[in-house]
Image (tube, rainbow, N blue to C red):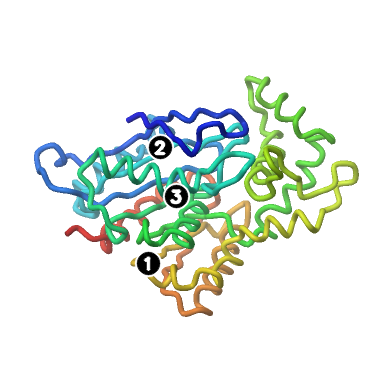
Amino acid sequence: MMHESEVLRGNAPGDPHIREVWVYLPPCYDKSGVSYPTVYCLTGFTGRGKALLNDNAFTPNLAERMDTLIASGKVRPMIVVMPDCFTYYGGSQYINSTATGSYEDYLSGEIVKFVDENLRTLRRNDARSVMGKSSGGYGALIMGLRHSDVFGLICSTAGDAYFELCYIPDFARAFRSIKGDPSAFMQRFWAEERKSPHFHSALNVIGMSACYSAKGSNYDLPFDLETGEIVEEVWQRWLEHDPVRLVEKHVENLKNLKLLFLDAGTKDEYALDIGARVLASRLQAFDIPHIHEEFDDGHGRISYRYNRSLELISERISYS
């Protein structure tokens, strides 16, 4: 489906405001005539919804995964929505930023309304869930923290949390790649057809800066461009977006959720298993019900963990 967004119109980077919204419909959808719960699946940094349907000889895409889970009885029929929140900077973190656009409003407001108006959905928060991994897991957490009236079930796999460990290790590599001029770096990045792996740290830091430390249509980096020293004022602005720090501000929203699931691999290269542990400890301190699990793997190629999220959602989401 194509959706024309009002909140993304005129965004600072000039990204499209008309976007594809990819949707998985369960095999029984056309014949049943009934309404279904929805799962919104959010991609990680540099991803967009269509990528969840990529063909791969060894790993099922999300539609194939759903078909198998439904056929086996492990998951009940659900609609899966795969939005596109990609930006010039690589992603949006699914939050509002003057430097990228109002992606939090886009997802929680416009896209939910659009899906509900065009498909047979159960239009309540207890029948609407959001899941994702990496930055998609972070986006799912943001929806639970601030929009539990829209999304009643949240699953985050290796979602960004405890920023000290998941981001700061990239700063030195980013500093060396940016070479004092982030705008020039972005121009080089987009001009290079082959996206070299050494670009990733710089793109990640610039992308997060555009989300967490926007300054009008531009952004502040968390380190000095001449020396590499961390700029404490900017870093503190980043920390204001850390789910670990946000728990205390949104306790009631989190307690209203039907499901809050966190998991991460114990070999995660961004230490997001530790981030999940710290976040789980904060949730426990405020008596917020949640499920926390770990698995033996790293950060990449862990889409098989979608199965666990989908099974938990299926168990707890409302079908009536």
Q: Quadrant of residue 214?
A: top right
Residue 228 is situated, as x and y percent measured from the top left of the image, at 85, 47
Is residue 161 depicted above or below 35 in this figure?
A: below
Is residue 145 depicted above or below 1 in this figure?
A: below
Secondary structure under tag 3 reads: strand
Amino acid identity at mark 1: Leu
User: Where is mark 3, residue-wise?
Assistant: 132
Residue 267 is situated, as x and y percent measured from the top left of the image, at 58, 56
Residue at 58% x, 69% y is 278
Secondary structure under tag 2 reads: helix
39 or 114, nearer to the observer: 114
Residue at 84% x, 36% y is 180
Which of the two marks, 1 or 3, is nearer to us in this view? Answer: 1
User: Where is mark 2, residue-wise?
Assistant: 52
Amino acid identity at mark 3: Gly
Secondary structure under tag 1 reads: loop
Residue at 72% x, 42% y is 219
Q: Quadrant of residue 179?
A: top right
User: Where is mark 1, residue-wise?
Assistant: 257
Residue 281 is situated, as x and y percent measured from the top left of the image, at 55, 74
Residue 296 is situated, as x and y percent measured from the top left of the image, at 50, 58
Going from N to C along the chain, the mark reached first, 2 or 3, is 2
